[in-house]
Image (cartoon, grey):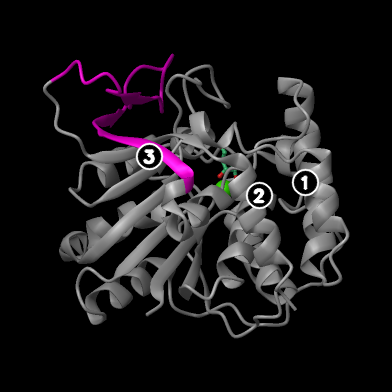
Amino acid sequence: MKLPIIIDTDPGQDDAVAILLALASPELEVLGITAVAGNVPLSLTEVNARKVCELAGRPEIKVYAGAIRPLLHNLVTAEHVHGKTGLDGPVLAEPTMPLQKQHAVDFIIETLMSRPAGTVTLATLGPLTNIALALIKEPLIASRIKRIVAMGGGFFEGGNITPAAEFNIYVDPHAARLVLDAGIPFTLIPLDCTHQALTTKARVEKFRSMENNSGPATALMMDFFERFDVEKYGTDGGPLHDPCVIAWLLRPELFTSRDVNVVVECESPLTMGMTVVDWWRVTARKPNATVCRGINSDGFFDLLTERLAKLA
Ligand code: BDR
Ligand code: CA
């Protein structure tokens, strides 16, 4: 049986690759894609999500627009990383598939309330605003979610938008805190893990040589996306964050993790959005997340390459 998932996302080149990986994977049933404001404003992320579905040859996938801004803070975007469109790199056609009329938050609630409890997984690739709003609007969904698998946070690795905070959590720390506190099975894939998944030249060339649309388009996205991180970290390639979420759903054995407590800092201006991970279990706070620390990066890229090659 396929695992039903909703992908909540702010594409973003790495979000795009995560969507492609999910759509290429027969183990997963993508019930819908919900867009949120993050890397770029919502008006672009929802369009980008549809562009990616069409790139994958899957225009029948339902895409919904969600929150236009974080719960309390003003929106912070990342055009300096992702470019003006959020998907700079390849030239992708304007989508012709429609945006769904229903609001993303209502789609999430309706799906969780109508499907059997404990069956639907949320794969979140951006700020957690849509998920927090869904929990506020219909708290009963908390006990119906099978698991949330989220890219976000960083602990030993520190942050990437401030010294303490990772982008997805920093953009909407209050949403992240609310979601982590909701008692839902939660897997966190932080920078500690994604910084090991580097788009080296050799790996990107495998995408470029594929004889379909998605492989070369992915290579062009990586060429653009990694330039910022390559300069920042001095590595061969940049971290490919969001596809790690989908990889965890497909092959959790590629990751090392611990069940520990995570609290999101929402008060200090200096460390706003920091994920305070009790890795060494030095507090009495109960574990609320499976936190990943390591990834078998060759295994991850083998999986990604095998799957992208299968797309139309
Ligand atoms: C996260 O922030 C975004 O820029 C990426 O898409 C990823 O979800 C990495 O910190
Ligand atoms: Ca993202």
Q: Residue 174: x percent and y percent?
A: 33, 38
Residue identified by numbered label 3: 72
Q: Is residue 239 visible?
A: yes
The residue at 21%/21% (across/down) is: 281
The residue at 59%/48% (across/down) is: 299
| Quadrant position of the C terminus in the picture | bottom right
Q: Disc 2 vs disc 3: Cβ atoms closer than 8 Å?
A: no
| Quadrant position of the N terminus in the picture | bottom left
Q: Circle 2: is it few (<14), some (14-19), or many (20+) Cα within 10 Å?
A: many
Task: Respond yes or no on whether mark 3 lies under 8 Å from ligand 1.
Answer: no
Q: Circle 3: is it few (<14), some (14-19), or many (20+) Cα within 10 Å?
A: few
- Magenta segment, which residues? 254-283
- Helix, strand or loop under label 1: helix
- Helix, strand or loop under label 2: helix
Q: Earlier in the sequence, mark 1 or mark 3?
A: 3
Residue identified by numbered label 1: 203
Q: Circle 1: is it few (<14), some (14-19), or many (20+) Cα within 10 Å?
A: some
Residue identified by numbered label 2: 301
Q: Is residue 66 above or below residue 187?
A: below
Question: Label 1 vs label 3: CA separation?
Answer: 40 Å
